């Protein structure tokens, strides 16, 4: 699909890289026509920091892609993407042209929130019931990503309980999930992809708050470190 097939009021994730740091920003598509030779584009609300619009026109910034949820699937444009800030009657907007056509990503329709949260994973299997330290790398309302020691005996279809405490938001969780896949990493540790056993409103609320804090942090980082052209 092309980017101009997205309906108005679709939430977009702008993925950028500043130096070695990856940042994310959230905007909404809007109904705005632009006189242009670009065959495919969308317009979106501009991000404001301290009352000033954020421009991505900087040598320090690399656009990694644009993500959206369309028809219950995640789509991402990672090539031939640019973001231009413009003003229409005093209102700042983003003009986002993209010539590429993409297919939906092969995963369920929920953005993953980066975590890097330390906790524990309890394995529940006949004849085996033990705790290991785990790093929660990312989470969505449907799944959770973990990294554990490479020697950890965990396989697809194992029932797990993941426990962690987020001291920033002051919340503790005990999440029942099912291991879907495992992968050995170059550093000798094991990556475990899990599916939530049940959908939880508490998890959904937590992830919304976590995402809000992350977006706020990324905006402040961008404002401090990026010098626009």
Image (cartoon, helix red, strand yellow):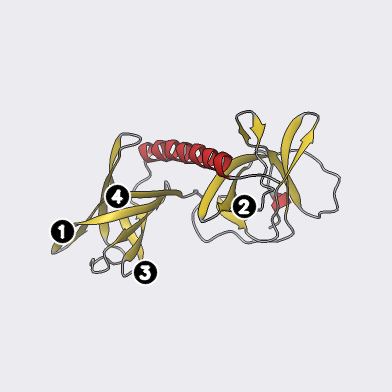
User: Which label belongs to residue 118?
Assistant: 4
Residue at image point 77% right, 53% down = 40
Towards the viewer: 207 or 167: 167
**What residue did someone put label 2 on?**
60
Q: CA distance from mark 3 to mark 4?
A: 18 Å
1 or 3: tag closer to the N-terminus:
1
Q: Residue beneath label 1, please?
A: 129
Q: Residue at coordinates 78% horizontally, 38% vertically from top-left?
A: 32
Dot 2 falls on a residue whose secondary structure is: loop
Label 3: state its secondary structure. loop
Q: Earlier in the sequence, mark 4 or mark 1?
A: 4
Q: CA distance from mark 4 to mark 1?
A: 20 Å
Q: Position of residue 99 (x, y in %)?
A: 74, 59
Mark 2 vs mark 4: in front: 2
Q: Percent x, y for residue 152? A: 23, 66
Classify mark 4: residues with Cα within 10 Å, few (<14), some (14-19) or many (20+).
Answer: some
Sort mark 3 into few (<14), some (14-19) or many (20+) by Cα contacts within 10 Å.
Answer: few
- Image height check: is 52 above or below 21? above
Residue located beneath label 3 in the image: 185
């Amino acid at each position: 699909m092309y980017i101009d097939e997205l309906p108005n009021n679709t939430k977009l994730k702008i993925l950028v890289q500043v130096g070695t740091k990856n940042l994310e920003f959230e905007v909404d598509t809007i109904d705005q026509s632009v006189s242009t030779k670009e065959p495919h584009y969308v317009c979106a609300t501009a991000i404001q920091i301290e009352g000033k619009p954020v421009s991505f026109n900087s040598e320090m910034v690399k656009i990694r892609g644009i993500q959206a949820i369309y028809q219950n699937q995640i789509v991402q444009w990672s090539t031939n993407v640019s973001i231009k800030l413009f003003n229409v009657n005093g209102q700042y907007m983003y003009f986002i042209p993209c010539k590429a056509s993409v297919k939906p990503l092969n995963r369920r329709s929920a953005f993953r929130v980066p975590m890097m949260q330390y906790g524990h994973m309890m394995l529940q299997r006949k004849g085996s019931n033990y705790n290991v330290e785990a790093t929660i790398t990312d989470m969505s309302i449907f799944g959770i990503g973990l990294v554990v020691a490479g020697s950890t005996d965990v396989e697809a279809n194992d029932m797990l309980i993941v426990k962690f405490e987020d001291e920033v938001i002051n919340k503790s969780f005990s999440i029942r999930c099912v291991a879907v896949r495992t992968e050995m990493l170059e550093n000798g540790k094991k990556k475990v992809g899990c599916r939530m056993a049940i959908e939880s409103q508490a998890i959904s609320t937590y992830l919304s708050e976590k995402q809000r804090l992350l977006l706020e942090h990324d905006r402040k980082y961008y404002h401090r470190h990026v010098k626009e052209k």
